[in-house]
Image (cartoon, rainbow, N blue to C red):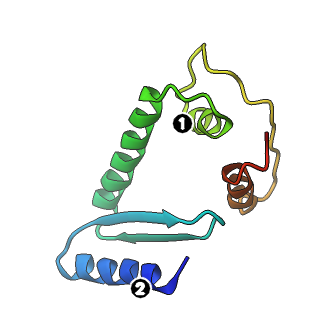
Amino acid sequence: MNDKIQKLIKKLAKECQKEDVALSLAAIDLEGEMAISQVGKGTIVAIAAHSQYTLTKEKLEQSDCDCPKHRLLKEMYGTETETTTKNTHTFVTDDPNDLMDILSKIFRGEFK
């Protein structure tokens, strides 16, 4: 992720903090590098994060795409329907830090 994006996220977080505005923001690039910013009172930040989750889940529920990426996301969000084909890959990891590596490989199409 380039420096400009990271600086803009930090600048936005500072401005939100100054104006007493809650912020929940996550940015991720195709290599899996992620920048997360959460500013404000915990309960309001939690509402913002949950709103993002809900919006994403609703969009997945409306999607009729059955590609491996969407099947994985639908499984992660619990939106699989009976017509959704099950993913044939199983990922077992003891280290939660491996999740970003696995997701990056999936989004690059390394698993078919």
Q: Position of residue 23 (x, y in %)?
A: 31, 66
Q: Is residue 52 left or right of residue 29?
A: left
Label whose residue precedes the other's in the sequence (2 or 1): 2
Q: Position of residue 27 (x, y in %)?
A: 48, 65
Residue at the spot 42% in from the left edge and 45% down from the top edge: 53
The residue that mark 1 highlights is: 77
Q: What amino acid type should be assigned to the residue bearing mark 1?
A: Tyr
Q: Nearer the viewer, mark 2 or mark 1?
A: 2
**Label 1 residue SS:** helix
Q: Position of residue 30 (x, y in %)?
A: 61, 63
Decide: is 111 above or below 86: below
Decide: is 11 above or below 47: below
Residue at the spot 46% in from the left edge and 64% down from the top edge: 26
Place residue 98 in its image quadrant: bottom right
Query: Residue farthest to the top?
Result: 82
Q: What amino acid type should be assigned to the residue bearing mark 2?
A: Lys
Place residue 55 in its image quadrant: top left
Q: Are marks 2 and 1 in contact (CB under 8 Å)?
A: no
In the drawing, what numbered circle is on residue 9?
none
In the drawing, what numbered circle is on residue 7?
2
Residue at the spot 59% in from the left edge and 36% down from the top edge: 70
Q: Residues within 10 Å of mark 1 (few under 14, many from 20)?
A: some
Decide: is 4 above or below 63: below
Q: Position of residue 40 (x, y in %)?
A: 29, 70
Q: Is residue 12 left or right of residue 62?
A: left
**Label 2 residue SS:** helix
